[in-house]
Amino acid sequence: MSNTSEIDLTAVSKDIRKSGCEVLVIGTGQSPDGPVLLDNPLTGKSARALADTLSSLAVTGAADEVRRFPGLPETGADVLVLAGTGRSGSGQPLTEETLRRTAGAVARQLSNVESVAFALPAPTVDQAAAVAEGILLGSYTYTEHYSTVGGKAPRPSTRSLRRATILTPAAQDRRLKPALERARTIAHGVNATRTLVNQPPSHLYPESFAQFAREHVKGLPVKVTVLDEKKLEKDGYGGILGVGKGSSRPPRLVKLEYSPAKAKINLAFVGKGITFDSGGLSLKPGAGMQTMKLDMAGAAVVLAAVAAVAKLGLPVSVSGWLCLAENMPSGTAQRPSDVLTTFGGRTVEVLNTDAEGRLVMADALAAASAEGPDAIIDIATLTGAQMVALGKRMSGVMGDDGVRDAVKAAADRVGEQFWPMPLPEELRPSLDSTVADIANVGEKFGGMMTAAVFLREFVGDADGAKIPWAHLDIAGPAFNEGGAYGYTPKGATGVGVRTLLAYVEDVAERVDRHSN
């Protein structure tokens, strides 16, 4: 994995030549008359000549376009890069997400380059921070399992970005430094999530995931409690135990607790952590298993989000519940028609062992509810139906209106794509069982929503009222099987980390505003 903490981020307000970077990046856009330069830092004849030859150079200004040219003497850089934004040159400022994606596309596509100066149109602190975030996210690579057998270097290139300079009028603003540090914290969390999800199941399993969690929050004010299979059985976590019964590598429940002094709000995050999903005895087809190492993405997101909240010192208590199990077929695996008892005593008839994520999360939702948080959010690669409904880049969010809408607003703010979906009441009867309190599968059509209706059954009460709750289904967006784009690599994406962090920030801001 590329280590974003090793990338030196600086900002200058005027003379880009002082950066001493190998590459200078200038943004381009699209207009009715053809490609245009955006916020061109060049002057005089060089600026006019470059602007006049964009079409001849086959530059279009389209998003994700990264074109290299020899550097110009006045820039002090060996290489000039024109980076497409996909936006028009109408004078309207670029959105933070556009800047994030443009910077990410450059960082991702430039190999064998150690220093880059970004002269994108980012006049404000927030825009400059978005550029920084894009750089750090786009520079991610996962190379852990490449070897050097035969003298060949690992792929991709080991010579990676070490220094990035951002040209911005906000360079001297005292708010920029903490904004850049926040960007680094966010990128660290997202990239740690990507690395966990990219790990092969031979290396990542419940016990090793739990150890990674301990190491990830080391030095932060986060308490870690790990429940092994004996403790899970003693305390009645039948959902997690049932799913993990078929594997030789037993399940774990990891609880993270961040409890700052004077916190007035207590939130709970629950993440699905199936380190490999074969489907159990309801076996998936072979092709359907090839990417099933991704099925622990929800737990990875929760781990990264809690760590980021603690790193930033936000005045909100947050607990994170990582439901870790490996779903395998064997002589000890749970069977279709088995009945298990989840934490708190509710019974579930298991009609399909491949609908296992909701079983492990049922335990954690009930356990989190017992502590009476002000809101619960769960996140999971839960259903293939999510992709049928919303595609591979749009996640679904369901639940109580207040939490659901707050999650959507947070996602919009940070540039992650979530779409609110309903929870039709007519779906609940399809989950009725003749032998238990509820069945783990119901109505096939609208299956994303049916799964959420199941989860809602395990959200408890506090002070006589149902705890506000939202469910995030990231089944498609968590893992990019197509080509890389923007700051998003092929493979694990880390989607959800930024949304959960932004949600906590918004909650903290509302509490602060109301207390004043």
Image (cartoon, rainbow, N blue to C red):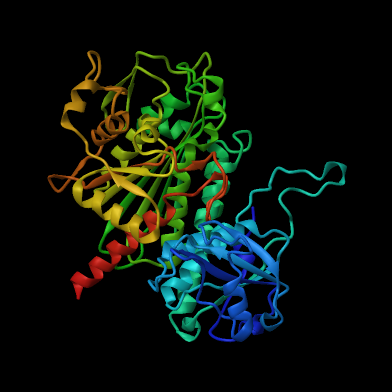
Q: Is residue 98 above or below residue 78?
A: above
Q: 311 or 402, which lies in front?
A: 402
Location of residue 232 in the rendering, given as x and y in whole percent from the top left corner:
41, 33
Q: Is residue 437 visible?
A: no
Q: In this rendered view, identify the residue nearer to me: 285 or 432.
A: 285
State the image coordinates of residue 406 (x, y, percent, origin top left). 26, 55
Left/right of residue 263 with respect to residue 162 in the rendered view = left
| 333 left or right of 405 in image | right
Q: Is residue 102 above or below residue 167?
A: above
**Residue farthest left in this picture:** 464
- 226 in relation to 430, above or below: below
Residue name at image x 61 percent, y 82 percent: 16
In terms of image quadrants, where is residue 74?
Answer: bottom right
Q: Quadrant of the C terminus?
A: bottom left
Q: Is any part of residue 291 visible from this angle? A: yes
Residue 370, given in percent of the width and then of the height, sits at 26, 43
Residue at horizontal 28%, vertical 33%?
449
Q: How many dots with numbers?
A: 0
Q: Nearer the viewer, residue 407 or 340?
A: 407
- Percent of width and height locating residue 202: 63, 33
Q: Residue furthest right?
A: 150
When asked about the image quadrant of residue 58, the answer is bottom right
Q: Is residue 158 left or right of residue 251?
A: right
- Residue at position x 53%, y 84% from top? 13
Q: Residue at x 29, y 57 (%)?
A: 409
Q: Residue 438 versus residue 36: which sits nearer the camera? A: 36
- Residue 464 lies, with reference to residue 344, above or below; the image says below
